Image: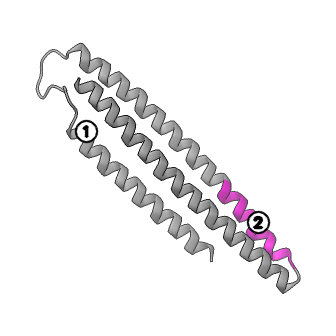
């Protein structure tokens, strides 16, 4: 029962991570103002690199917070699942199982929505950063 939920979460996370990696690879190839060969690096490039590093640090902190929240919710759901074994009445077991499933799927839904919002924010901020770097 829980294997399907965790497999689905794992697949969704892998797809999200793969999409982010592909997007970052494309962005890295389109950096404006980055010299292609050796030579002096303009001050504008230094500023752009610093802004990019700050931006990337912010992204990583946000992802770490999101993952911590997901793990915390997962631990709570696992604890609730173990408590299901303590129920004596089959009707109560069924009710609590359905409630747990609803909580788990709601948590997955919220996690996915948060990842989509974060990705939209990342794309918007990166586009803003890239356009300012090119200007």
Q: Between 110 and 36, which is closer to the camera in this rendering?
A: 110
Left or right position of 75 against 66: right
Q: Residue at x 25, y 38 (%)?
A: 28
Scheme of image coloration: one colour
The alpha-carbon separation of the residues under discs 1 and 2 comes to: 44 Å
- Residue 107 lies, in percent from the top left, at 63, 60
Overall secondary structure of the magenta stretch?
A: helix
- Towards the viewer: 70 or 105: 105
Residue 63, horizontal then vertical, whole percent: 51, 44
In the picture, the quarter occupied by the N terminus is bottom right
Q: Which segment is the magenta one?
A: 73-87
Graded by Cα atoms within 10 Å as few (under 14), some (14 to 19) or many (20 or more), the crowding at tag 1 reads few
Residue 112 versus residue 87 in the image, above or below: above
Along the horizontal axis of the image, is 58 left or right of 23? right
Numbered disc 1: secondary structure:
helix
Confirm whether the magenta stretch covers residue 74: yes
Residue, disc 1: 28
Give the quarter of the figure containing the C terminus: top left
Residues at badges 1 and 2 in contact (C-beta under 8 Å)? no
- Percent position of residue 67, x then y: 56, 49
Rendered image quadrant of residue 44: top left
Residue 35, percent from left and from top:
15, 25
Residue 93 versus residue 122 in the image, above or below: below
Closer to the N terminus: mark 1 or mark 2?
Answer: 1
Q: Give the SS element for disc 2.
A: helix
Label 2: which residue? Answer: 80
Q: Residue at x 27, y 30 (%)?
A: 131
Location of residue 90 by image quarter = bottom right
């Amino acid at each position: 029962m829980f294997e399907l939920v965790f497999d689905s979460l794992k697949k969704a996370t892998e797809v999200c991570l793969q999409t982010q990696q592909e997007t970052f690879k494309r962005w890295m190839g389109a950096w404006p103002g980055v010299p292609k060969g050796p030579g002096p690096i303009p001050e504008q490039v230094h500023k752009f690199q610093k802004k990019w590093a700050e931006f990337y640090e912010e992204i990583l902190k946000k992802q770490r917070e999101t993952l911590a929240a997901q793990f915390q919710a997962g631990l709570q759901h696992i604890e609730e699942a173990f408590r299901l074994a303590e129920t004596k009445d089959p009707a109560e077991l069924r009710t609590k199982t359905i409630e747990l499933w609803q909580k788990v799927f709601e948590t997955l839904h919220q996690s996915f929505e948060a990842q989509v919002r974060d990705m939209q924010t990342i794309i918007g901020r990166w586009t803003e950063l890239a356009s300012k770097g090119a200007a």
